[in-house]
Every structure is written in C-alpha cells, then in structure tokens.
Image (cartoon, grey):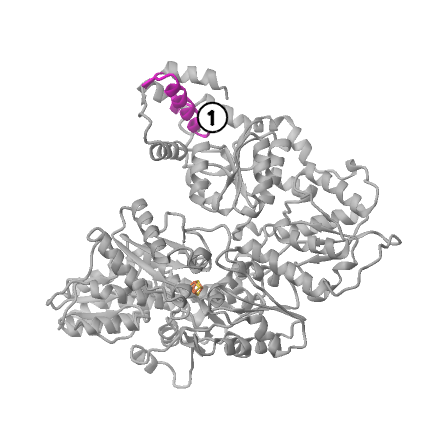
Amino acid sequence: MQLTVWTYEGPPHVGAMRIATAMEGLHYVLHAPQGDTYADLLFTMIERRAKRPPVTYTTFEARDLGSDTAEIFKRAAKDAYERFRPQAMIVGASCTAELIQDDPGGLTKALDLPIPVIPLELPSYSKKENWGASETFYRLVRGLAAEQPKRPPNRLSRPTCNVLGPTALGFRHRDDVREITGLLFQLGIDVNVVAPLGATPQDLTRLPAADFNVSLYPEIADVAARFLEKEFGQPYSKTIPIGVGATNDFIVEVCGLAGIEVPDLSAFASNMPWWSRSVDSNYLTGKRVFIFGDGTHALAAARVAADELAFTVVGLGCYNREFARPVREAATELGLEALITEDYLEVEAAIARLQPELILGTQMERHIAKRLGIPCAVISAPVHVQDFPARYAPQMGFEGANVLFDTWVHPLIMGLEEHLLGMFREDFEFNDSAGASHLGGHGAAEKVSDAVAASEQTGEGAIAVLHWAPEAENELKKIPFFVRGKAKRNTEAFARDKHLETITLETLYDAKASYGR
Amino acid sequence: MFCGLTSIMWLHRKMQDAFFLIVGSRTCAHLMQSAAGVMIFAEPRFATAIIEERDLAGMADINEELNKTVSRLLERRPEIKLLFLVGSCPSEVIKLDLGRAAERLSMAYSPRVRILNYSGSGIETTFTQGEDACLTAMVPELPHTDAAELIVVGALADVVEDQFERIFEALGIGPVHFLPSRKPGHMPPVGPNTKFLLAQPWLRDTARTLEARGAMHLPALFPLGAEGTTSWLKVAADAFGVSAERFHAVTEMPRARAIRALARYHDTLAGKSLFCFPDSQLEIPLARFLSRELGMTLEEVGTPYLHSVHMADELALLPADVRISEGQDVDLQLDRCRDARPDITLCGLGLANPLEDEGLTTKWSIELVFTPIQGYEQCGDLAELFARPLIRRTRLAV
Ligand code: SF4
C-alpha cells in the first residue's frame, strides 16, 4: 500500500487512452465503472480536444457484480462497433474490472467482429501510465503490422522513416512532430507514417514499408521500435533531438540510418547558440538549476542546461523508474546523485535543501517552485492546460532550442537588474518585494529562506541552533533574495564547520570568501 | 459522471479538522488530481492509500498495511481529529471491510482521533452521493439533544451559510446548526425534537439516518432562486412558529434584491432552451429555477437518480411535458441533445468542448457545485453562470 496525494503518472489504462485518442479510426472499449469516465476531461479540457476520446466505458455497477458484468461488456463492445464503425478496436479493463476477471479479449473474440480486435493486459496494480501507453502501442503495432510482408531495401527513391511515439496529452508532441518531420524532409528523408498521433490502424499496417524508425519519445515508442527492428530489420534512432547539440547528433544519426551524407550543419541555424553567447547572457553562467521530469526530458534538459546555457546542474532526477539508469549515469557524470522517486514530497525536500535558482520540472515542480518562490519552467509531462499553448512551441529541433532558451531564461532576473538590486538594497521601490521588472510582483521573496529554515529544522533536528548576531542578520537582508537562501545556508554550514555558536558580520564575510559565488 | 470520491473536493475544505483517506487504486488518486482541473496545492486534507499487487496477491496483509498507513498519516498530521476511510471500487470488489478497520483503528486512536468510514466508489455512488455517504456516516456520531433546534444539512459555501444564519437569527429561529460544520470539532446535536432542512438535493441516506434518530425533515424546494429560497426559509419559519408578518419583514428586502438581480439576465435567458445531462442532482431544482424565474424552456432534464419524495415539490413545478431522464447512457443522450439543438447544454467537463465544437453552447455542471449559488444574494450569480456562455458567443467575432 502506498500513500500518495499527487501522482506523476495515472493508471495504465489512461496510457492506453492516450494512444487511442491520438489515433483516428480506432476505438477503445474499456471495462470500467461510470466514475472512470473522468479521464475524458483530461483530453477535452487539458488538451482542449474538440472530440471526445474514442472510448466506450461499460459502466457496470455494484448490483451487476457476480451476475452479468461479462454480458454488459459484450453488449458495450457490440454497440460501440455498430455506432462508431472503427477500423480496429482495443479492449481491456480498468483497475476495478481487472479484479472481476471478465476477460475482455475473449468476450470480444466471441462476438466475431469483422475488424481486428486487440486485447490489452494492463496490470493496474503494478504498472502506470507510460507503461500502459507503451504496451498499447506495441500491441497495436504487433497486431496490425506483424502480418505484413518484409520489404526489400529500396534505394531508388528517397529514404523513408516512421516517426514513433507522439500521443494525445503529450508534452508538446504536436509541435515536436511538425518540427522533426520538417527537419527530416529537409535532410531528404520522407516520413512514411507518424504514429500513434494522427495515424489510423490502416496506417500502422504500412509501418514495415519504411527504411528505419525515429523513436521520438522512448517512454512510449521504444518497445514497438525494438519489435519492428527484430521483425522487419528496421533500425531506430536513439538520439532525442532536444537542444542544438542533440539535434546535430540526431541529424548525424538519422543520416547514417538513411544511408545519406550528412549535410553541412551550418545550413540549419538556430538562434540559440548566439543568444547564449551574446554578452548579456553572461549572467546565466553557473545559475544553479534543478531538473526533474520523465527520464528522457530530464536527461535532455541536463545536457542543454550544462552545455548550451552554462548553467550548473545541482539536482537531476526522474519519476519513471524504467528510465532511471541513464538518468543515474548522467547524474554521476555531473557529480550528483540522481533523485529517482514518484513522491513529490521527496522532490520538494530536495529542492528546498538545494536552493536552486531555477527549476526545470513538471507541473508538480511548478507548484513546488511557486510555493518556494523559485523561478521555474516546465519541461515534461505531467501536463496542465498551460502546457498546450496556442502558438507553435516545440521542444525539439532547432526551433525547439529557441523555445528552450526563451522559456528557461525568461523566469530569471536579468543580469544588470540583478546587480542594481544588489547595490541599492534600501531603495524603497526597487527591492525584493518589488521583484523583477519583467515579471510583475514577486511577493515570494522571503519564502526561500523560510523554506530552508523549515526544512533544516525538521530535517536536521539534531543540529544545534545557530545564533545570528543582529548586525550580521541585517547584512544578510541586504543580500538579494534570490541568493539570500544560499548565503544563509553557506554561512551556517561554515559556522558549524568552525564550531561557532554565533554568526557575526565577520563570520558572514569569512564564509563568503571561502565559498565564492 | 464522476464517482462519489469527487465530493471530497469540497468536503475536505469544509471540515477543517477532518482528513479523507481513500483506500483505492492509482485511478482514484488520478481522479482526485484531475477532477477539479487544477491541483489544490495547499496541503490537501485527503490522500489515497493505493492498493498494490502485493496487497492483492496476499504477500502483504492488507489490513496490516492499512494500519501502518494510518499510523504514518496520523503521525505526520497530528491536527487530524476526524479521519474518514473512504472506500472505492477496488476496495469494495475485494471486499475489504473498512467498517471493521475503522472500528479497530478507532479503538487504537481514541479519544484523539475519531475514525469513520463510507464508500465513495463508482460502482455505488455518483459524484454528489459521496457527500451523502459521508454525512450518513457522521449521523450516528452526533451528540443527542432534546432541544427543538434546526439543522441545515448539506455543505454550503461559507458565505451562503453566513447569510442563512443571519436570516434565521432575524426570524428568531436558533440556534441553527450546520452539517457538516465548518467549525473544527463541532458536531450538531440531534434528537426527537430536531428539525432539518436539506440544503442540497443529494442527501437521501443522510435524511433517512437523521429521521432514524428522531429528527424531522422539513420538505421544501431547494434554496435556488428567489422562489426556492423563500419556500425553503418559509417551511422552517412555519415549523418554528414564526409569524407571517415577521417572515415578510425579514425576507422582503433580500427577496426584492434577488428579483432585481435576476431581471438583469431575463432578456438573455428568457425563451432559451436548456438540455441537462445528468451530473450532480442539482439539475431538477435548477431547471425549475431557470424555467420559472428566467423563462427558459426545457428540452430534457437528466439526473443521476431521482428521489421522488425529496423532489416531489420540485417536480410539481416543472412543465408537465418535460422529459426527465434518470441515469446515464451518454451516447443516446448525445443523440437526443444533437437533435434538440438546445441554446444551452448543462454537462460534464468531458462533453463541454466537443459539444461547443459542434456549435452548441455549454455550461459545466461542476461549476455549480464549486460556486456559491444558494440563497437570495446568489440568485444573480446563478443566472449569470448561465448567461455568460451565451453572452460570450454573441461577443466573439473569431
Ligand atoms: S470510479 Fe471507482 S476506481 Fe474509478 S476513481 Fe472512482 S472509486 Fe476509483
């Protein structure tokens, strides 16, 4: 039994819904109580989809248990087929129906529908949303493409690939697909099928016709991509094109897979490198950033943060254990210990302890950041309505790199303003509580140091309380709020190290000298 | 339609010393964070104990696990005085006896914490029925009294509660208790001389349990609109022997104010047709209000279930030919809705955008349970909720 308030991932059948909703001509019959229909609103409200998810819920009730829930399922499946006339159906159970073991697959088979019906086994009590999406996609690909003939390599026309992984309710999937298919086209590679987003079951039968696959979101596509590799000899790409460096690597990789020459990369310009090199970006140097999300996005963000913005990554982690290993490796390389957890309280504690100047995370971290008064940008699912902007805002490719620069840098206080805030602490209009000029009121100025204090009191109760001499405390207040938490923490650590009980003005500056910025 | 767990969204804010521990699955936890459309990040007073593979496979004793979960929770949140173990579909299907668990744990933690249980499962309850189940579980805990006092049953927004309290005081009815109470630790006393008003239409079992303790239900319209509010107050006034003059004197001003507020929306809403998908059980009283006080016409009024006794007064005021549908078959209802092409469709969040895309104007039903709409002073706000989507349509030129 696991006690939880907020979760990073929903149950696995929600993952299946993300596949079904992304596709056209597919219908999902879900053995589930009426209450589980709540999941529709994720798609219609958060993503603002104008169509209901193609899901029929059987809506059995307590009084049906033990008598005719199987009958209810059969009727629902039959009605759904007749009403929606899909090209193919997936059938399965939610957590409750899993317990009553009605075997949706067998029941539908008995109906003898004239379309492919793919049964899903999604264990709700051990697996989660991403796994459910991945498994569903794999089952669909396997069920619909496996019978297709193997295609002899054809080098007469332009090379082709499939783009695998984008779903409904994905973080910027819509825009990433546009960016990456555009890039592939420019490279001279045609896209055979994009799936699941926008694909029909019919399209999935055409997957084997491509020369190779692009796995855009490994959490969802890798299992299917590995199947296609084994079954049809289609290799797949491993680089995730987030950031300028990774996009360049991606180009090299796909050109290799396509058997074409790597073009002159300078032809594919992004503004990002120059924006990052321009002198005004100097202030970004060494900004302490905390990164948390799904494994793929967290890894990508760490690379961009360190190599393309010269931030210092002070924390890195992910919530999906399936992708823990590469995240651990990347963290080790950065000299950190990866935070692998599904418990947002642990994430919050880590953030409060580390005092980053910027958080790159999910909607959960956005809430944590708001509470602690730390700037934040969202880089990964789980998503919120705000993560579906009206404008084109990919994360991937060269335009994606521009978007990353803008969205990550925007929440920070700008360089010269930072200095002025530091120099004129006592200006009544221009201080902490006024906040950064481009961000509206700040108001959360004191929260960081409060949170540190709180976390230290609860977390490290054994440590003797340090006394701040009044003049040292006053001086501390002159330090801008966005570094004050860190200064306080460093000074106290310094004092403990030196076994001091009282922190004086001297201690404060001794500590400053020994820590640097 | 949501399951009964969803009512924890307002109950946990209303009862400040209570905590709701759902014993369920990842789905239940996911529902709780998706239902309101926003995460309530001010440490919510609810959580989900997610049943896992090992609990089901018998690798862990599930009752033992529950004990541990509760003890960890109570350690971390010492301010909890009342803990609800809330059953879900999975806990019901595996026949986890939360009643026994609550008794067992009550013994261990009494008197510091009282532990009760009810089911909010989607195989037994819909949406607002969760509140009914919760309050029903509380009734046996209420202290006894022989005093002739009034209880208002059903969670109301604090501001509405305050307004009603002032009116009852002016009428000389008092003290008035509210169930659930927003005052920590307060449990309204009940006994053979108690009379109670239902502030919400979804409290069938709560009413029955209160009656079993000797309390008397005062049947009335629900306090939506000027007419509903007046009927509701009048029934209480009569039961407590308030003179007609005094009733008139106290209610005249706010009633006139309500009617004035409604008049502003009359032009927008009169003659417009309404179609209600079943969701909260507010549909019938709302339809009565919108048709009688704002002149709307009714295409169909859906309700999750129909309690004919509690709804008797309401139904009597609806046009004779209106179609009332009970329960949900969403595809058939959608067919009827598309046929009718109503001016406004009251529906759940899952349907709103798809219907808007088909050119229909919608109002989300969940907003009605999260907004103060009862009583005189809220009449205008309630009408505005329905007028806004129509006005918006006429203003937009994109
Ligand atoms: S319908 Fe049942 S399983 Fe689904 S969220 Fe509600 S209680 Fe949980």
Residue stretch rendered in magenta on the structure = A475-504
The residue sitting at 24% across, 58% down in the picture is B181
Residue A367 position in % (x across, y down): 45, 44
Describe residue A460's horizontal placement relative to residue B239 as left or right.
right
The residue sitting at 43% across, 35% down in the picture is A352
Label 1 crowding class (10 Å Cα cut-off): few <14, some 14-19, many 20+? many
Question: Quadrant location of ligand 1?
Answer: bottom left
Q: Which residue does the numbered mark 1 point to in the structure image?
A: A421
Q: Secondary structure at mark 1?
A: helix
Q: Does residue A196 appear in the picture of this structure?
A: yes
Q: Nearer the viewer, residue A114 or A387?
A: A114
Q: Residue furthest left?
A: B146
Q: Nearer the viewer, residue B320 or B140?
A: B140
Residue A487 lies in the magenta-colored region: yes
Q: Residue furthest right?
A: A156
Residue A420 lies in the magenta-colored region: no
Q: Residue furthest bottom?
A: B321
The residue sitting at 66% across, 39% down in the picture is A243
Q: Quadrant of residue B91?
A: bottom left
Residue A91 position in % (x across, y down): 58, 69
Residue B297 position in % (x across, y down): 44, 78
Q: Does residue A373 appear in the picture of this structure?
A: no
Q: Is residue A35 above or below residue A83?
A: above
